[in-house]
Image (cartoon, helix red, strand yellow):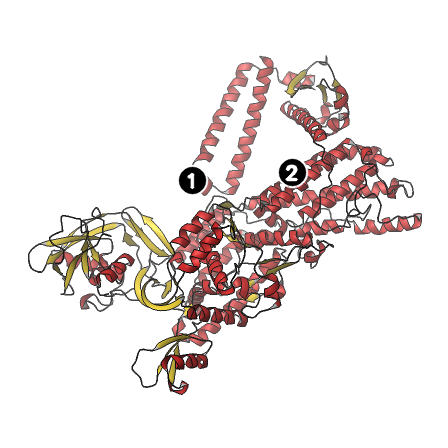
């Protein structure tokens, strides 16, 4: 007798014993109404249930601390894409899972102001719609325009998130520029400044002329060009050429000798302050210390020696332009050379040389080359491999300019972050990113945190000086001007009323405020109850592409400002790409919005969005054309309605730890059909439970004790497989291997529960409705369904809840809504037996298909086996699942005519081919061989086509599906001929 706990689905005591027949009939009647389900699964009809965040949860509280995490705040630059959907779904699955285990959760949503990106978009919109620049409006009015944008896009983003059926703590929603977060930013800046980690200095910065702002090192992409290459540069009508080396000469001032230098940026030669050679280069040893004549500035510049020069590069002599090159900047500091800026913030040449003043930097290149030729100093050009620094946001070629900026010293904080990982205090998964973590942090440079923008947190730093004093001002960090004067008065040793203060005009890098998120969302710098309870976070989950933009900075800032790591585990997921492996981009037309998959959309509507983006300035005319073509190829028939659950399931059916995650809309459609399979299985279960309990005598259906040993073979088998699935899912969740969990759920529900078990018990349910065996099948059906829906709930919350609510509360099954525990009914021996039987069934089905034996021919099959008694237990299962009219199990070969056979392990399967079909096989072997050769040629041609490099990128999904289907058909025809030929040999 199997006695299990109250919370076990096979409980030994029923939670309700209905002694009254009248009460029983009423109870069944009420449950029958409750259990009515629509004919098919339609996602939109069950979406957005208000109780999804509370339905599936454990009644028993866990002793573990709260599970706390934050949603990486989406930028208000636009709407969400599938990358956001992936992040949200991963985190939501974890939140739901922990809730179902009885753990308290806190998942904070928010929005990021996205300084540079948002300002650029709003500026484009203003110019496209009203022909205005931000300067036409003024700072205050421009900020109002951005806030309008934020309010509009923020509302859309929140609605998109809610469509994903996620359990965020919406009452905790934050915005990186709201009052509390702004206070945290100010406090953090002041503390870091007063700790000596923030400083202001003239330094070479990465400058985007298009953005009119400095950008950080990790916002710079380095594009490798091999030889002459044209690149599109914002602000230029024609592409600009890169990938060539120019040689020109400097004449010595005291002789006719010359030194030839080689450069990839001839336009910067106006700012040359020296020519440098390697001190070991014997070609130039006697020239070191001599002076050269600058042909356009009409000044003398020295020849210097420094070991950084590669004697093998170019001529072995390099020009030094410290105002526009990081390496030259460091060399200039070593040799005490002056800086001469020749390119300004707008990308125009300065007035260093009058004849070139105001010319665009790349237009000036040709003019300078022409002038060098005129004065007979040009020595030729040649193709050359080079790296071009490009702004990741504006796609502008980065200029290195000397600007006064604010910097955060990172070396000490980075050293601590490296040590935390090395000592295991901070774990990174996948572990392969640990090496990247060390490399980046061990070579980190100080972070330029100031941006020349209007949208963002204005830097809380004030330049203070005594009134009517010409002395150098002092910089202080303060909450406001009054506090700044109070601090400055101590430094300047004067009365506060004699001090004038001016706040810095720049704003902070967006990633600075984002880096405070783990603790600022909980009220830091105040010592709030939430901060005490939910910080540090339990986990930081995000895409690996922002490991250093965001995660590393959270670790450095969090450790310094709060004294503890902001989280102890980092989970990184891959980047969403399309089905061809291309990164999703608006300009490629392959971006998929989550709501388009959830609700479905037409190609026309998708095109309308692209055209709207063009009208508002987000896309150029060239990008619009490319995007429209891309959408037509990717989604010729639009996107069918799949629902949020199918989208979630598809995203997590891939290994999220992979570097790239290829997303195919067709997979979503498949998973929506999987949802319908579960729906129909639930309908089947409810139908037969109602039929069996109505057919059973009064009270017999509610018998409160079950003998597990009396359960049928297939009942015990499916419960064993249920245990296997639950164990696999639990282990997968522990290790964040969601793709293993989804595969296990689909394997059990789709194949083992629906295709095998349901089919195997149909005969018993129909023929033995009033017998005990039918009731046992109902118990098994309900047990599996209850456990599966609870295990499925984190992945498909809407569908799971809707179906679980319809389960009748019989034998205490369905009363538990926590994450399902194992039944401990694993039976490996029985599983092995059933696997052998399913192999037999598969073989019979295949032979029937090869010879086109449909049920109208009354299919007949035999199984020759040495274990007749054991196999006989599964006689009806084999007959039902193989769809046979006659089936016999023998210990010898059958004598029936027209047999075809195939070996299955230690057994032999025989299928009778009817005489009518045998006659059709009496064909000439030669003709059959010719047909096979033709099919093989066709198959080879198709395989060559799909293996071509450009096929997956250029062929439409529909074309690829047709090709895959055709290949499967050809293989089946070839297999059939091969099999028939083997019989005739």
Residue closest to the eye, 246 or 951: 246
* Horizontal relation, residue 273 to residue 506: left or right: left
Q: Are marks 1 and 2 in contact (CB under 8 Å)?
A: no
Instruction: Check disc 2 and report its element: helix, strand or loop.
Output: helix
Residue closest to the eye, 543 or 909: 543
Q: Where is residue 755, by image quadrant?
A: top right
The quadrant of the image that shows the N terminus is top right
Instruction: Of the two numbered discs 1 and 2 on the same chain, state the one appearing first in sequence.
Output: 2
Residue closest to the eye, 512 or 763: 512
* Horizontal relation, residue 686 to residue 842: left or right: right
**Residue 72: where, in percent of width, then height?**
53, 58
Q: Residue at x 40, y 80 (%)?
A: 490
The quadrant of the image that shows the C terminus is top right
Can residue 190 be seen here?
yes
Q: Which residue is drawn at 22% across and 52% down?
A: 307
> Label 1: how many residues lie within 10 Å, few (<14), some (14-19) or many (20+)?
few
> Label 2: how many residues lie within 10 Å, few (<14), some (14-19) or many (20+)?
some
**Residue 333: where, in percent of width, then height?**
25, 62
Instruction: Check disc 1 and report its element: helix, strand or loop.
Output: loop
Task: Pick out the residue farthest to the left.
Answer: 255
Q: Nearer the viewer, mark 1 or mark 2?
A: 2
Cα distance between the residues tagged 1 and 2: 33 Å
Mark 2 lies on residue: 747
- Give the answer, above or below, for where 75 lies relative to 82: below
Mark 1 lies on residue: 950
* Horizontal relation, residue 611 to residue 748: left or right: left
Q: Which residue is drawn at 63% across and 46% down?
A: 672
- Give the answer, above or below, for where 774 lies relative to 601: above
């Amino acid at each position: 007798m199997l006695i299990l706990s109250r919370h076990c689905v096979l409980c030994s005591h029923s939670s309700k014993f209905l002694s009254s027949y009248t009460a029983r009939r009423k109870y069944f009647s009420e449950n029958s109404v409750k259990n009515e389900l629509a004919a098919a699964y339609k996602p939109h009809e069950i979406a957005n249930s208000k109780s999804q965040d509370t339905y599936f949860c454990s009644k028993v509280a866990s002793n573990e601390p709260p599970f706390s995490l934050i949603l990486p705040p989406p930028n208000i630059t636009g709407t969400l894409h599938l990358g956001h959907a992936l992040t949200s779904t991963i985190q939501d699955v974890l939140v739901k899972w922990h809730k179902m285990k009885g753990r308290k959760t806190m998942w904070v949503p928010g929005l990021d102001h996205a300084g540079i990106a948002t300002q650029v978009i709003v500026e484009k919109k203003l110019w496209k719609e009203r022909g205005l620049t931000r300067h036409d409006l003024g700072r205050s009015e421009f900020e109002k325009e951005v806030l309008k944008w934020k309010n509009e896009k923020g509302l859309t983003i929140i609605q998109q998130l809610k469509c994903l059926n996620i359990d965020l703590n919406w009452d905790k929603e934050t915005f990186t520029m709201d009052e509390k977060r702004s206070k945290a930013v100010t406090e953090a800046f002041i503390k870091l400044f007063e700790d000596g980690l923030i400083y202001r200095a003239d330094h070479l910065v990465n400058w985007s002329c298009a953005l009119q702002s400095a950008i950080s090192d990790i916002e710079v992409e380095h594009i490798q060009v091999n030889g002459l290459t044209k690149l599109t540069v914002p602000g230029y009508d024609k592409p600009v050429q890169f990938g060539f080396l120019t040689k020109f000469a400097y004449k010595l001032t005291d002789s006719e000798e010359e030194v030839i230098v080689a450069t990839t940026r001839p336009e910067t030669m106006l700012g040359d302050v020296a020519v440098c050679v390697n001190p070991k280069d014997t070609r130039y040893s006697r020239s070191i210390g001599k002076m050269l004549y600058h042909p356009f500035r009409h000044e003398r510049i020295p020849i210097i020696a420094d070991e950084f020069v590669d004697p093998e590069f170019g001529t072995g002599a390099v020009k030094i332009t410290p105002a526009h090159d990081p390496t030259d900047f460091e060399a200039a500091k070593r040799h005490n050379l002056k800086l001469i800026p020749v390119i300004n913030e707008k990308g125009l040449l300065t007035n260093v040389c009058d004849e070139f003043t105001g010319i665009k930097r790349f237009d000036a290149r040709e003019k300078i080359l022409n002038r060098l030729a005129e004065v007979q100093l040009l020595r030729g050009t040649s193709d050359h491999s080079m790296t071009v620094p490009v702004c990741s946001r504006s796609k502008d070629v980065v200029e290195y300019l000397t600007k006064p900026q604010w910097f955060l010293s990172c070396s000490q904080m980075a050293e601590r972050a490296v040590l935390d990982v090395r000592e295991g205090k901070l774990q990174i998964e996948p572990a392969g990113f640990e090496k990247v973590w060390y490399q980046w942090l061990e070579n980190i440079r100080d972070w330029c945190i100031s941006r020349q923008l209007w949208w963002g947190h204005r830097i809380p730093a004030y330049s203070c000086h005594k009134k009517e004093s010409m002395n150098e001002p002092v910089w202080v960090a303060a909450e406001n001007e009054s506090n700044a004067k109070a601090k400055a008065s101590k430094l300047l040793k004067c009365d506060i009323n004699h001090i004038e203060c001016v706040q810095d005009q720049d704003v902070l890098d967006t990633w600075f405020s984002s880096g405070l998120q783990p603790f600022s969302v909980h009220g830091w710098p105040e010592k709030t109850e939430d901060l005490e309870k939910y910080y540090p976070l339990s986990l930081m989950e995000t895409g690996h592409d922002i490991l250093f933009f965001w995660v590393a900075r959270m670790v450095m800032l969090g450790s310094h400002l709060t004294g503890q790591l902001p989280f102890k585990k980092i989970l990184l997921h891959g980047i969403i790409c399309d089905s061809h492996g291309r990164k999703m981009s608006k300009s490629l037309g392959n971006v998929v919005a989550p709501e388009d998959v959830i609700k479905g959309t037409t190609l026309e509507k998708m095109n309308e969005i692209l055209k709207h983006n063009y009208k508002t300035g987000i896309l150029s005319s060239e990008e619009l054309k490319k995007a429209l073509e891309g959408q037509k190829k990717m989604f010729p028939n639009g996107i069918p309605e799949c629902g949020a659950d199918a989208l979630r399931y598809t995203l997590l059916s891939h290994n999220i730890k992979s570097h790239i995650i290829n997303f195919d809309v067709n997979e979503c459609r498949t998973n929506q059909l999987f949802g319908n399979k579960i729906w129909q299985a639930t309908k089947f279960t409810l139908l037969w439970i109602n039929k069996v309990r109505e057919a059973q005598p009064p009270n017999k259906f509610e018998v409160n004790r079950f003998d597990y040993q009396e359960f049928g073979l297939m009942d015990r088998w499916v419960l064993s497989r249920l245990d296997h699935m639950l164990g696999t899912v639990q282990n997968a969740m522990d290790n964040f291997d969601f793709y293993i969990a989804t595969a296990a759920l689909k394997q059990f529900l789709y194949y083992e529960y629906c295709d095998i078990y349901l089919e195997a018990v149909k005969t018993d349910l129909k023929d033995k409705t009033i017998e005990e065996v039918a009731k046992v099948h109902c118990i098994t059906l309900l047990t599996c369904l209850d456990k599966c829906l609870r295990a499925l709930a984190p992945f498909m919350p809407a569908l799971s809840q809707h179906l679980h609510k319809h389960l009748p509360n019989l034998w205490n099954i369905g009363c538990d809504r926590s994450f399902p525990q194992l039944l401990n009914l694993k039976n490996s021996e029985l599983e092995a037996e059933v696997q052998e039987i399913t192999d037999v069934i598969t073989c019979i089905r295949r032979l029937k298909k090869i010879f086109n034996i449909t049920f109208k021919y009354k299919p007949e099959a035999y199984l020759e086996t040495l274990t007749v008694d054991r196999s006989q237990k599964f006689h009806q299962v084999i007959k039902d699942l193989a769809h046979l009219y006659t089936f016999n199990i023998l210990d010898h070969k059958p004598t029936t005519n027209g047999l075809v056979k195939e070996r299955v392990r230690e057994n032999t399967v025989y299928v009778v081919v009817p005489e009518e079909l045998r006659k059709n096989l009496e064909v000439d072997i030669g003709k059959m061989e010719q047909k096979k050769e033709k099919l093989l040629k066709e198959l080879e041609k198709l395989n060559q086509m799909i293996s071509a490099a450009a096929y997956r990128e250029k062929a439409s999904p529909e074309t690829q599906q047709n090709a895959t289907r055709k290949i499967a058909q050809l293989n089946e025809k070839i297999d059939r001929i091969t099999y028939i030929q083997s019989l005739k040999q």
